[in-house]
Image: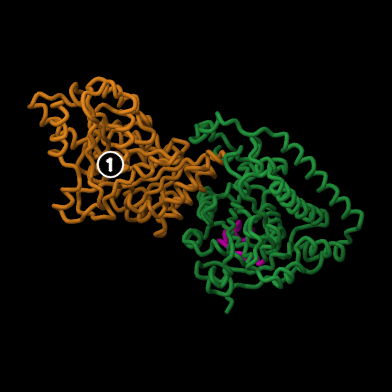
Chain colours: A orange, B green
Amino acid sequence: MAELTYLQAISDGLRTEMRRDKRVFVIGEDVGVYGGAFKVTLGFQEEFGHWRVMDAPLAETAIVGACTGAAIMGMRPVAEMQFADFISCAWDQLVTVAAKQRYRAGTPVPITVRLPSGGGFSGGPFHSQNPESSFAHIPGLKCVCPATPEDAKGLLISAIEDPNPVLYFEHKHLYRRIKGEVPEERYTVPLGKARTHREGDDVSVITWGAMVYTAEEAAQQLESDGVSVEIIDLRTVLPWDKQAVLESVRKTSKALVLHEDTRTGGFGAEIAATIAEEAFEELDGPVKRIAAPDAPVPFSPPLEKAFIPQVDDVAAGLRELAEY
Amino acid sequence: MAIAREAEPVGSLKEVREAGLDREDLLGVYHTMLLTRGIEERGHILYRQGKIPGSFYTGRGNEAASVGVATAMGPDDVGTPLHRDMGVHVVRGVEPWRIFAQYMGRADGPTKGRDGNVHMADSKLGLIAMVSHLPAMLPVAVGCALAFRIREEKRVAVGWFGEGASARGDCHEAMTLAGVRKLPMVFVCDNNQWAYSTPTHLEFATEHVADRAEAYGFEGVVVDGTDVLAVYREAKRAIEKARAGGGPTLIESLTLRMEGHAVHDDAFYVPKEMFERWAENDPIERFRSWLRENADMSGEEEEEIAAGVKKALNDALKRAEESPLPDPSTLTEGVYATPEDLDTPHHK
């Protein structure tokens, strides 16, 4: 075991698969000589050559479309969007072509698209978004949102190995801030299996990505008030581990769904609806959602801070639920 | 002012032989063109009989273009044909009964009733099924070429698009990527002069779509799309150039869409004289005359081919009508691929 940052764990997972499997190649803007905007592929071109670590023109449609074609021809492409926000330019290739090809034509499309997502750095409206719920609505895609370095490596390897198009949302705010023990060998973390980040008895928080840490700080605050909080880290939102969520909610009888994406139509709505449908009798209070307000991600620090759910917001929500 | 090269027509049998086709091949090409048109004509009848749900598209007038290009492809080459390119499926060997089954939404169509009309392909034949969003398959075809380049295989990808689709960004991005990486790729523009009801001068401002090729760093060529041999020769040149590492080519094949966008459309907006003028250049009639004059195709041979096509269509239709409709309980099957799905020739 070595202690790695979340970013190093992503690099490690990618390097592990590229060393093991010659079919894996990386394509994206500035991923070669520059090593990627966030340096995830730093040194990769020296090791794997410029045909397996390809600097692409500024053309997201061509990048994702080419991955689809190469995957159908037996490769295991990994595309990097410089920022998750730019995936909008490749929507058609993902949603129209890749997601539907297996269902209608029997052709599997094993591609992975890495998406540096999330806010917290004054990135503004186009470098801060969390677009996972848009894609979680598309049958045929999978959406992965790791929170820990160990999961970042294991989920990336699973994504590359998976025979479907997988969107891998890597939260930029975790890149260098979060460190953890990561096994040196190759391992996989299954897609669709949640992780209990913290065990508790009184309220369940269901979340993923960077919000796992926000929830953790809030849970620590509530500990001194005698409220025991359980945190379920979904790890993947499509497929999502309904069973783990319902089990936790049945234990605590109270649920708070937390995400950094905006509220209306966010993936939390799906989780809240499912809890209401399938665990209504076991609830002791309303299912609460904490999410960003329905606005673009603002640039200026006080505005952005008001946009992204903060520890105090989550703690207040938990207290409100605890009182039921 | 045109920038693209204008292809020469093919004259004699000698020239054709030089391009790689012998007399038997030529009769085969004629058979395939007839079969292509026959499939679509029968499909149109089925549609009128109410046996085909949804809409129905044909490639009437484009048979030489689709068959010509596909005939020039090697067995390991791959392609992404569109809705005017039925001939590509036929050349690559799809069984006609499966096409009728596809049209009728039956369980034995290539998409098992999950998709309709020409939205199909058999990946074992090296084809990838199109989507309605044109030309979204061009970046996919470029990705196939990229895989061949990475693995240093001597294979070529062919991507089809229409002159209408040439307006979209995917087309530009695909050509940009193929150009900068000199990928083994051939772009084929079926310029049938009408994007639904919109004429070419409202789709692009250059004389030819192929004029753009120079801007992407490769050659553009315009060919008469009603001349199957000229199309074949240009496609062969482009494919072999790509195979040899010479990079992409953009072939623009000029035809007229001889029917509406789909069969519900009577194409009232196309001037009558335009239809009349292009009807004189019907690709099948043109090739039939050429074979009679240059390859001594006898009346007997011609009849034999026509009878073979008729029988193939009758048999195919019968078999397709016996195919069951899909079972609604299978609706959600196959949304996601399983690891076993990767057990294909491409994923070895």
Q: Is residue B295 left or right of residue B108?
A: right
The N terminus of chain A lies in quadrant: top left
Q: Left or right? Give the position of B154 relative to A201.
A: right
Circle 1: residue type: Gln
Q: Secondary structure at mark 1?
A: helix
Q: Which residue is mark 1?
A: A8
Give the residue displayed 53% in from the left and 56% down from the top.
Answer: B134
In the image, B26 versus B303, the foreground residue is B303
* Quadrant of the frame with the C terminus of chain A: top left
Q: Nearer the viewer, residue B295 or B278?
A: B278
Task: Residue lying at the far bottom in this picture: please name it.
Answer: B1
Q: Chain of mark 1?
A: A
Q: Residue at x 30, y 30 (%)?
A: A183
Residue A124 higher or lower than B11, as above or below:
above
Q: Residues within 10 Å of mark 1 (few under 14, many from 20)?
A: many
* Residue A230: x %, y % from top left: 21, 26
Magenta stretch: give its range.
B239-255
Task: Residue A13 in the image: state x and y as whole percent.
Answer: 35, 38
Give residue A176's position: percent from left, percent from top.
21, 44
Vertical placement of A104 versus B251: above or below? above
What is the x, y in percent for residue A80?
Answer: 37, 49
- Check if residue A255 falls in the magenta segment: no
Q: Residue at x 24, y 20 (%)?
A: A251
Specify whether B281 is left or right of B204. Answer: right
